[in-house]
Amino acid sequence: MRNKILILLFTAIINASFSQISIDDSSKQVAQDISIPQESVFVSFNSNLLLTGEYFYYSVYCFNNNSKQLSEISKVAYVELIGKNEATIFKHKINLEKGKGYSDFFIPVNVTSGNYKLIAYTSLMMNTNSMFVADINIINPYKTNKETYIKPIKITDSVSREFFENKLINTESTLKEDKIEDSVQLSLNSNTFKKREKVSVLVNTEDENINLKGVYSISVRKKVKFNIPQKKLNEFSNVINGNNFIKISNLSGNKVSLPELRGELYSGVVNSKSNNLPVNNLKIAISIPGDEYFFKIVETNKNGEFFVNLDDFYTGDKMYLQVLGFDKDAYDVKLLNYQSVNQSNLQFNDFQINPVWKDEILEQSIHNQIESAYFKFKPDSLLLYKTEKLFQNKQVESYNLDNYTRFPTLKETINEIVKNISIKKVGNDEYVFAIQAFNFGTNTGVKPLVFVDGIMIQNSTKLLNFNAYDIEKINVYRDRFVFGLEVFQGAIEIKTIKGIDDLSLDSFVNVSEIFKPQIKKKYFYQIYNSETINSRIPDDRQQLLWIPQFSIIDKQAKFDFYTSDVNGEFEIVLKGFTEDGLPILLNKTFLVDE
């Protein structure tokens, strides 16, 4: 029964926003004894000491503290790199698939040397202000920081002390470090390699009690004298041993931040312009334009709030909001801004540089500059998402206007070229479109949907005078469509050549920038063979390999990579969790000679 109530509560609030929402008295009374499984986040990264001009790579693991396994609750995580005085270096939104996600950040030269905090959390974790915290230290060889002391470095890792600022995660791990080291190994085909040589690595265990099946990150990076040692096993295993639940009744006031169960969650509010009071029962059309555009219709509640769940891929970076129906200009529609967790309790370490590092910092900086200069020869590639279009599998009548004699306006183009669309006068100088249904004997009188580059357009009269020479294509759909409680007879898609100017839209359309998730990448993988081994393109990689999600499905797994033109000592670090929540941390060093 308890689980049924929990499911019903989640169903009732599934469209709630990432930002905190109100719970009315009746809902709160029902929720008094309902507990929601809490989550924990762990972030694995390639290094906690980097130079500007390098990439910071990271992988995110989100755990259900009840099951001790990867969480199926949240579909989004948030990762931020924070400097002193809450200065934000980057803020990323990460899509989670079965509790896992990843991304990267190129550290620009305007970032000063110092100690920074990496924080990560989900919307559910905001209720207790819990977050993953780790120290990231950056050296900028091009910019002087007066606060940097020229002394031997002394840095402590906040993660080794505690994962969460509010002390939620404090249970000691029952796993023994020596058992992991003795039972799981990294084996190399050699301990010394030449430049541009293949390195093969085997991960295996002979312990029948250890199930290696899981997902890990793999980093192969040059070790430097001023590098900070990697974390030990028992310093990150506690991530899965937190409190099991948070209770809604324990939350402050009537505010609660809900998990993003199906994707990104946004909220907004609609107020009357006449008295600035919230307005309920208004239908809001939401469009995100682009090659793969998003459209949904939602309704305001008694507090004038509306919520939208972005559960599919989209390409645009702006959200267009407008009230449907009459008197659209009488309302003020606003998208609420993203709110981060409280960062005021973060304590930063004094970052200190030793003068003896000068030569090594210079050498590393030169390698970075060379790699940057030849980046176009070693690009990462974006992973394409497969998604259904808004009118997927619907019969379409498409008109590419280059195939016809062009007319000056859209009105003339429709009258002369486009079939099954009519233009009707409904008032003094006001016109609407009508699309003929497949049943020609039926005149429904229901208006169609009209989109220009993925933006819903309600002012058909204004659109009729649109310059048709700027239109590339017109698509006509004659099916009946239902969005929310709104019914539309057909749809018209107009794709322009150069895009539509926001300033040309009606005043009742609110345009807001949105905080988009990071797009996943397939990272560059260097391969040498008999034809490329003598390539004259410099290879100054110090990060030889980064695999954010390396899956092991059996007792062993293999991977390989190639050394670069950089010699010295390199370290392989495999870090992650088995499907049973068992933390694994392995490392192995090797040498690259001249």
Image: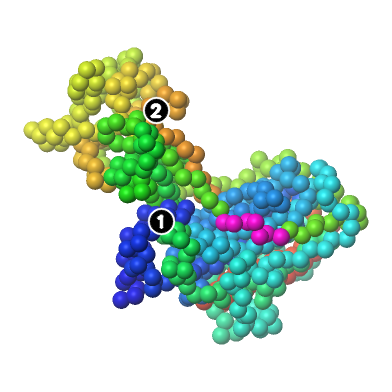
In the rendered image, the quadrant that contains the C terminus is bottom right
Instruction: Using the image as rendered, state which of residue 408 and residue 303 is in the foreground.
Output: 303
Instruction: Using the image as rendered, state which of residue 226 and residue 424 is in the foreground.
Output: 424
Marks 1 and 2 sit apart, C-alpha to C-alpha, by: 30 Å
Q: Secondary structure at mark 2?
A: loop
Residue displayed at 56% across by 62% down? 129
Crowding at mark 1 (Cα within 10 Å: few <14, some 14-19, many 20+)? some
Query: Which is nearer the N-term, disc 1 or disc 2?
Result: 1
Residue displayed at 48% across by 48% down? 384
Q: Secondary structure at mark 1?
A: strand
Q: Quadrant of residue 396?
A: top left
Q: Seen in the image, is 219 located left or right of residue 395?
A: right
The question of residue 406 being in magenta is answered with no
Q: Amino acid at mark 2?
A: Ser
Crowding at mark 2 (Cα within 10 Å: few <14, some 14-19, many 20+)? few
Q: Main secondary structure of the magenta part?
A: loop
Q: Seen in the image, is 457 located left or right of residue 144?
A: left
Range of magenta residues: 341-347
Q: Position of residue 533 (x, y in %)?
A: 72, 51
Residue displayed at 20% across by 31% down? 435
Residue 33 against residue 322 in the figure, above or below? below
Q: Position of residue 4 (x, y in %)?
A: 31, 71
Mark identifier at residue 22: 1
Residue 163 against residue 489 in the figure, above or below? below
Does residue 22 appear anywhere in the picture? yes
Exactly how many numbered labels are in the figure?
2
Residue displayed at 29% across by 31% down? 327
Q: Seen in the image, is 499 located left or right of residue 546?
A: left
Q: Position of residue 321 (x, y in %)?
A: 39, 38
Q: Give the residue number, with chain letter if any, for mark 2.
A: 507
